[in-house]
Amino acid sequence: MADATTRSLPSAAATQWLMSMPPAARFVLHGDAAARAAAAPVWGTAFAEQACRAEIGNGRAALWLGPDEYLLLSADIESEAALAASLEQALGDLPHALVNISHRQFALEIRGPHAATILSGACPLDLDLAEFPIGMCTRTALAKADIVLWRTAAEVFHLEVWRSFSGYVTGLLNEIALEFHRV
Amino acid sequence: MNAPIDGLRTPSGGLVDRTRRISFSFDGRSYEGIEGDTLASALLANGVHLTGRSFKYHRPRGILAAGSEEPNALVTVSRDAARVTPNLRATQVELYAGLIAESQNRWPSLERDFGRINDLLSAFFPAGFYYKTFMWPRKAWKALYEPVIRRAAGLGRAPTHADPDRYAQRYAHCDVLVVGAGPAGIAAALTAAASGARVMLCDETAQFGGSLLADGGALIDGLAAQAWVRQAIESLQSNRRVTLLKRTTAFGYFPHNFVGLNERLNDHCEKPPQHQPRERLWQVRAKQVVLATGAIERPLVFPGNDRPGILLAGAAQTYLNRYGVRVGTRAVIVTSGDDAYQTALDLKAAGIVVAAVADLRPEAIGALPEAVRQAGIEVLPASTVLGTEGDLRVKAITLGRVEAGSIQPGQRFECDVVLMSGGFTPSVHLFSQSRGKLQWSDALKAFVPAVSAEQERSAGACRGVYDLGDVLADGAAAGTAAGEPAATGAAQRRFSVSAPKRGSESYLGVLPQATSPSGDKSFVDWQHDVTTRDLALATREGFQSIEHVKRYTTMGMATDQGKTSNLNAMAIVAKSLAVAIPQVGLTTFRMPYTPVTFGSMAGTSRGDLFDPVRTTPTHAWAQARGAVFENVALWKRARYFPRGNEDMHAAVARECRAVRNACGIFDASTLGKIEVVGPDAAEFMNRLYVNNWANLGVGRSRYGILLREDGFIYDDGVVARTAADRFHVTTTTGGAPRVLGLMEDYRQTEWPDLKVWLTSTTEQWAVIAVQGPNARLVLESMVEGIDISAAAWPHMSVARGKICGVPMLLFRVSFTGELGFEINVPSDYGQSVWEAVFAAGRQHGITEYGTETMHVLRAEKGYIIIGQDTDGTVTPDDAGLTWAIGKNKTDFVGKRSLDRASMKAADRKQLVGLRAKQPGVVLEEGAQVAEKPGQQPPMILIGHVTSSYASSVLGHSIALGLVAGGRARIGQTLYVPMPNGDLEVEVTSPVFYDPTGARING
Amino acid sequence: MLIIDCPYCGKRPEIEFSYGGQAHLARPQQPAQLDDQAWAEFLYMRTNIKGVYAERWRHARGCGRFFNALRDTTTDHFLAFYKTGEPRPTLPAQHERTT
């Protein structure tokens, strides 16, 4: 039965500058410093104390979204359930909330010399490298959609988008980018 | 083609390329201009002054100015049927080959305009005539007056096709935004950039340089003005932290240094590149703003001052020096200061006869007047203007002499242009929009910026600094201060300047006239046809506030926002009220500085991108099945699935019967879902929802109700306890974000001590509802890990298991009144699992159904929809839901409000069923309910219909309604008044179907 | 569009925030003890100050946190930002005008 069950991904963007990323395991972890300290060794990355910063390592990432809220990303979707179980085990009775949101959202990557300019067509933040450095991440607005924006390299941004907004967000980015990438 | 009048184009000079000739058309006639022309300069080079008819009186009007302040020469430029832009100022329209422009507000033609009769009948169109004339009879307004006025008045016509162009928007951030690239703005940008700041410099015209582009003789740092501009711009261009934006108008100044810019990217192109947006709206956030917006020459107010051929003197100088165009052959100049004397010299040098310079001052002394006399031009001090002649073009002017306070007739001069200069009005529009405080300057006869409200500074002519050397120094100082706000005493950049001294002698109000002038109108506001008489009438009728005078006369309310008229109007009002000018004050400056297209404002928010269109995981499947969709919040939901020629009624009837008799499948993915997790999760839910959650076991669910603190129903939904410390809360589709917001508010601000966290999981789960007597038959072979038999798994059970090999959270829950299940699977699996269930259900009669069927089925059971059967004034008791409130709870959100006496009144509107006596009649949702039949308005009404459907299962229509004291009226007959008479309805229980709930527990 | 200095994320544009009304209104510990008049005061009565106003904001499209701000309603300039639960900061005397 399982073989017949295929994943239908929300977006199929694939251009030089805009790519749909493969599925990932995603969790939201809420909790205080003690919970984070317990989770970090299992997760394998640090949890940034500085606001709006991502920590990466070993195919995983922990993104600061709020003072007690982190977005955990792992490229390894096969061990999603095992990951959750080991995190829960490490967290034990420490007050926390771990919620699987692997399918709630999907990821886009926007790259190239125009990446920041294209995003500025709809995102109100200052994306100058000095103001929004590599490793910075935040929830923000992309026109009428909410996204998580994470700069992974000078000219590469990772976007986390709720799946039902896929048509809107990819359509919007393509429209904005038209003047830079002639079709 | 009309041959260009070579005599009007100078043989050399200016910023135009005489070798590149450009043909264009105006009002259907072909003309020729040259590269670098605006439409206005090209028309003037062809001897065309007449470019429009005035707004109210349809008087012939010509080009008055050379910039964005132009009030008269409004044109419609069109590329094709859809690309039509009305109300453009000819002075700003850049010429391109094949440009097609039309004048406005005339019929049948500019030269012979039928509306001119308004001028002859003008005694009947004084200020406020709208308010006076069209008051009575009231009915005539819509039918007669408004359509006629709308046709007669108004400016250009809007295009009738959808706009095919693309528009972009961009957020931008900088340390220093400099608005205006004249000498002050360029100097500011240079010094700000030198400090290392991120700088943006914008100018509304196609070329940087501002007034320097029209300056014949100035030298800056040893360079001719235009060469200096070129060098400065090149230096700015080479700095990658500087953004230069030409054809870009700063149209609005919003709080915290948020400035709106509108960039016109390709209106000047003969063939606009397809991939490029037509315009770009920049939303700039600047740490510091330098306003270098310059000044506008002030026209003079005298009888007949609006004839074509009467221009601002500075405009004539610009047309000559920048565009190489002589605006006429024989000029009379009327001026209040020295500036226009330079114009006289420039014109004479270009071969124009200057018949006289009429100076309003008692004496004309100093270097410039002397130079003009030396040039052989007659100078007439102590002058005034008594009138002008000419119909489609000025042909003569009659001056007067002011002697010892009385007006003596003066000379009459034949001429084809009159150039007027009343000094300058600093452009304080943006400063004023920023809420900066203005101060009246007696010396300048103008308002100038005094106290900034934002991190902003004005520089140059926009704050009354006119002399070129001072302007450059002022700009440089502003740029330095803005670039390094922390630094003090930084060395100031100096410029060595050789230029004629610029004066600042201004004139305000009406030129001196004989005591009872009976001549022609004296216009104050060209664009809205406001005359001195209109202003006098307004003050005579008791209007004292300038804001009231503005609205009564419509002075300053046209698309030019009174750029040339406001100061004169204010002075005239002050004089007739006999108060000082600062006491009258200015009207509020509003954005936009010049009109901005709707396209630019909308940007990408149009068509498919107007709003996000949210789709569920089964959307493609539903589309393939021919579903008709409806919008629910931002979602597209399948409303019904018509087969063959079915209409909605037939499809819904079939779908309803399928669910009641066999089995239906429904996509409920859009329901909001919130995961409430933490050791205090149950306590949190207890404080928030009306229900008792402490006694809800793991693996069970319950219908939850959330109130606002005022006691009225806010949202509802099934809440499941999936672990001791974990609740899966569902909300209404539209309510998900606001419920999460309300929960976060209480969690963070009222109960921060609770260890509980909230995560939206709306989109984590695809939700597939399988409903109907055969539902268990469909699922029992598919579900892994849960015994879903009736005995083992009663109604409202919840469990984790697997389906099709993927993880599942399964609910036994029903919004239809039938045996029902809701399968939650991770969204990416939604379509695949849906297809598997549908295939498995085939043998059991499974039928896909949409939201319309869902609505009918739930209404048959009396289940409410938040926002349809409730409206923000409905308590749980009103809705018949008292049973859901936890017994013995001392508090929950809204409880205290429910204890108020009025919340328990017996005559509150309560939810009941309404059954029309004629079974085929479906009541209108929203229709009112009356106790007594046959009432005439005003009626006494006791309730209204909230939901109403045809029920194919029951064989009659059903409705829900809120009726005063409704539960006590069950069995009564009430009346629904409709245009064709009352409909009789019987009040019933809201539960029309299976009142004992036998089916749901099957 | 205002610039709002979120105590957690720093300066962000207003579009990321939702407004939360008057600050420092605590929900009564035991609403049942309040008479109707006192409950109505809590529910409905808000000040409408010309001058410095303590108000709530939520960084809804950011870190999600509620916090408080002091804003001069005559200029729209913010004078202070502080976390929920912290006392209202004292401002230099010239700002403390309320009408």
Image: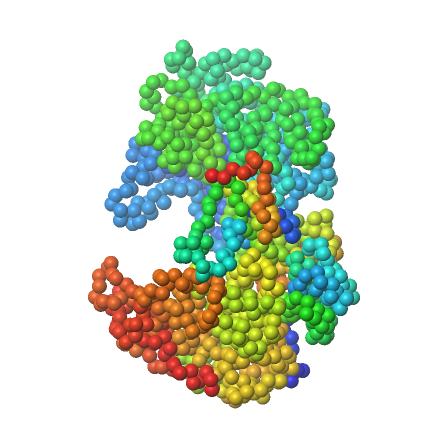
Residue beneath the point at 42% across and 73% down: B883
Q: Quadrant of residue C77?
A: top right
Residue B214 left/right relative to B480 = left
Q: Quadrant of residue B995?
A: bottom left
Q: Is residue B910 visible?
A: yes
Up the image or down, B741 lies above or below B971; here it is: above
Residue C26: horizontal and vertical position, in percent?
52, 54
Q: Nearer the viewer, residue B522 or B984?
A: B984
Residue beneath the point at 37% across and 63% down: B903
Up the image or down, B42 lies above or below B758; here it is: above
Residue B406: horizontal and vertical position, in percent?
38, 13
Residue B474: horizontal and vertical position, in percent?
64, 27
Residue A173 left/right relative to A44 = left
Residue B503 left/right relative to B961 = right
Q: Is residue B620 visible?
A: no
Q: Quadrant of residue B566?
A: top left
